[in-house]
Image: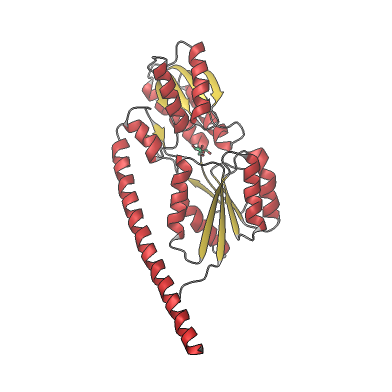
Amino acid sequence: CKEETKYRIGVSQCSNDDWRTKMNEEIQREIMFHPEATVEIRSADDSNEKQIADIRYFADNGFDIIIAAPNEADAITPVIEEVYDAGIPVIVFDRNINGDSYTAYQGVDNVGIGKSAADYARHLLPDGGNVIEIHGLAGSTPAVGRHEGFAKEAELKGMNIIASAYGNWNYEDAAIKVDSLLNIYEDVDLIYAHNDRMAIAASDVARKHGKDIRIIGIDAAPEIGIKAVADSVIDATFLYPTEGYRIIRTALNILNGRPYEREKILPLSSAVDLSNADILLLQNESLMEETSKIKYLKSQVDDYWNRHSAQTSLFYAMIII
Ligand code: FRU
């Protein structure tokens, strides 16, 4: 008979955007294959307070495991420590906390991505040049790593970071910052933004200023970043893996007492630029196609079970009468 739900998984996303939408879809796709588990995903919409409330909601409502991408490390560490110390397993992903009060971590080497971005910048500017860096949110760990890796490598490769500002991971803040920096600095060869939304903002603003500036972002979520490369809005982006399916499998391994990797650092990829953007978009289209077929099959199976259990109840009701 249909398996009963054994496990409830709570996912606390710090934000709601193209990258997280992709990850949430992967999570929902994976959970379809595990009828013993359900998942609830909440977005904190970039608010530390809301994320603290979301994590407490999962804990107070008896969720079996909490998966969280902390908005800012300092603000979110205490609540993660609180639920972890209370005995609820916690998987931290993407953005990290301070310390290691978690059951597992899944993330990416952000210093490595920053370094790859600097290598690519050098490829775009063989004679070196002037760079503006647009950071993510100050208190979020990927912004720290992406800066560190880039700055060290850029200096070695003869590039000058002449100015930098926080774009807080979003288009609007980045656009305002780039606008004021381009009013101050005449001679800018390249803008390195810590994600694609901010890179696209930089490109729009540079165009408004009538400037031809090379632009690099990070994430490579198909509908935003890869498309921006394919449309020549930005020059390159770097894949920041989401791997939603993997985090669900780790959660189920933890819940079922099976072995799991405590620190999973996902591998880095090479740059996405005009040489491969179209093929990656095509691959994504086939993936979307397959996903919609899986969703259709799943709805058929659910339908079958619902009808079957309605008939079974009717059958028992008739026997009792
Ligand atoms: C999405 C995002 C990504 C970025 C990541 C860093 O919310 O801003 O664009 O790569 O978070 O944590």
Query: Residue 225 location in percent, x, y?
Result: 40, 35
Q: Quadrant of the N terminus?
A: bottom left
Q: Residue sitting at 50 percent across and 67 percent down? A: 36
Instruction: In this rendered view, identify the residue nearer to me: 185 or 321.
Output: 321
| Tally of numbered discs | 0
Q: Position of residue 17 (x, y in %)?
A: 48, 40
> In the rendering, at what x and y percent does residue 190 appear?
43, 20
Whether residue 292 sits left or right of residue 100 in the image: it is left
Tell me which residue sits at (58%, 38%) in the image. Answer: 46
What residue is drawn where x is 69% and y is 49%? Answer: 81
Q: Judge whether 214 appears above or below 20 on screen.
A: above
Drawn side of residue 298 relative to residue 82, left or right: left
On screen, residue 189 versus residue 162, left or right, reads left
Q: Name which quarter of the figure residue 117 lies in.
A: top left
Residue at the location (64% across, 40% down)?
Answer: 48
Task: Pick the residue in front: 236 or 266.
Answer: 236
Q: Colour scheme used in the picture?
A: secondary structure
Q: Is residue 311 above or below residue 233?
A: below
Q: Nearer the viewer, residue 243 or 154?
A: 243
When the figure is inspected, residue 6 is found, relative to residue 170, above or below; the finding is below
x and y, in percent, of residue 300 in the image: 36, 66
Q: Is residue 138 above or below residue 91?
A: above
Residue 36 in view here: yes
